[in-house]
Image (spheres, rainbow, N blue to C red):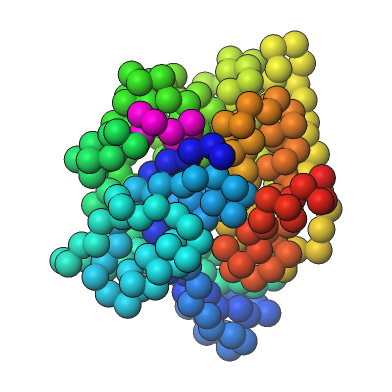
Amino acid sequence: MVKVCVIGSCAMDLVVTSTKRPHAGETVLGEHFSTVPGGKGANQAIAAARLGADVTMIGCIGKDIYGKAIIDNLISNNVNVTFVDSKSDVDSGTAHIILAEGDNSIIVVKGANDHVSPSLVEQAMDTIKSVDIVLVQQEIPEDTVSYVSDICHKFEVPLLLNPAPARFISKTIIENATYLTPNEHECAILFPEYTTSEALRKYPNKLFITEGSSGVRYYNGEQEILVPTYKVDAIDTTGAGDTFNAALAVALAEGNSIEASLKFANRAASLSVTKFGAQGGVPTRSEVEVNL
Ligand code: RIB
């Protein structure tokens, strides 16, 4: 069983479904409202655990009803929460999601996730040194992501950086990361000086650009490869990227080839969108393998 450490956000997703997305200044009548666990970090931790990894989460929640639900959910999915800090003076993170017209719109209120600090990460140093791979995203402060990249580089722990949501990243963080998984939009922000093809050639076997329903593109040192995704009837695409990243991390940590790992990750992500909620459709290991 590979060991994975996820450093990132925990949130409660407040989801409204509607047939129509409102324009600015417009009110529309929605259909359903649900609260379901989310946050890119927690989604990735739970996905990695369902896919068979031994997972430790480093994150922050508020001492509120959402915080309690978030931590209970992590525990019930076999995620080690020793380093999930419960803060008394801030609210848990929330994501305000509209599901309409076949896609989602999300506003994230970071809340406690803004308190995922380098000093919290430092408390988990022994764990980080002992894992097979670290996963980090960008719903936590940039100085924490920078610190994580430094220690992973120093202690030679593979680091998968999922640069979402998009923001500028220093060249040092990019160089320190073992794997980078932007979508096309994030890639353009990460590498404004390069075309997609140039960026891929600069980072062979490291940069994996997700292209939605087309698949994932990378450069293997000789040619660009597009690993196609699987066609499914999507119910809710929220969190598909998180399942993809978790599955990719698990498969790579297990020593699988890049192409096989991307295929596994695409399969896991495609299954994740067949149910409602960021974590609702996250598959188990056997559900992915039976469908590969
Ligand atoms: O990646 C999906 C996640 O992004 C949602 O669960 C929501 O919490 C937002 O942070």
In the image shown, does 149 or 27 lie closer to the viewer? 149
Residue appearing at x 68%, y 50% in the figure: 285
Name the quadrant containing residue 236.
bottom right
Residue 107 belongs to magenta span: no
Query: Is 19 left, or right, of 138 in this rendering?
Result: right
Instruction: Give coordinates of residue 44: x percent, y percent.
Output: 51, 50
Query: Is 118 left, or right, of 24 in this rendering?
Result: left
In the image shown, does 184 or 245 lie closer to the viewer? 245
Q: How many marks?
A: 0
Residue appearing at x 62%, y 43% in the figure: 247
Give the residues drawn in magenta, as a range: 128-135
In the image shown, does 245 or 285 lie closer to the viewer? 285
- Residue 160 lies, with reference to residue 20, above or below; the image says above
Q: Residue pushed farthest front?
A: 1
Residue appearing at x 61%, y 31% in the figure: 254
Residue 131 belongs to magenta span: yes
Q: Residue pushed farthest left?
A: 89
Q: Which image quadrant: the C terminus?
A: top right
Instruction: Give coordinates of residue 43: x percent, y percent.
Output: 51, 56
Instruction: Give coordinates of residue 225: x percent, y percent.
Output: 77, 25
Q: Residue pushed farthest top?
A: 222
In the image shown, does 27 or 117 lie closer to the viewer? 117
- Residue 226 lies, with reference to residue 270, above or below; the image says above
Look at the image and tell me whether residue 139 can be seen: no
Instruction: Give coordinates of residue 227: x percent, y percent.
Output: 78, 34
Q: Which image quadrant: the N terminus?
A: top right
Look at the image and tell me whether residue 45 can be seen: yes
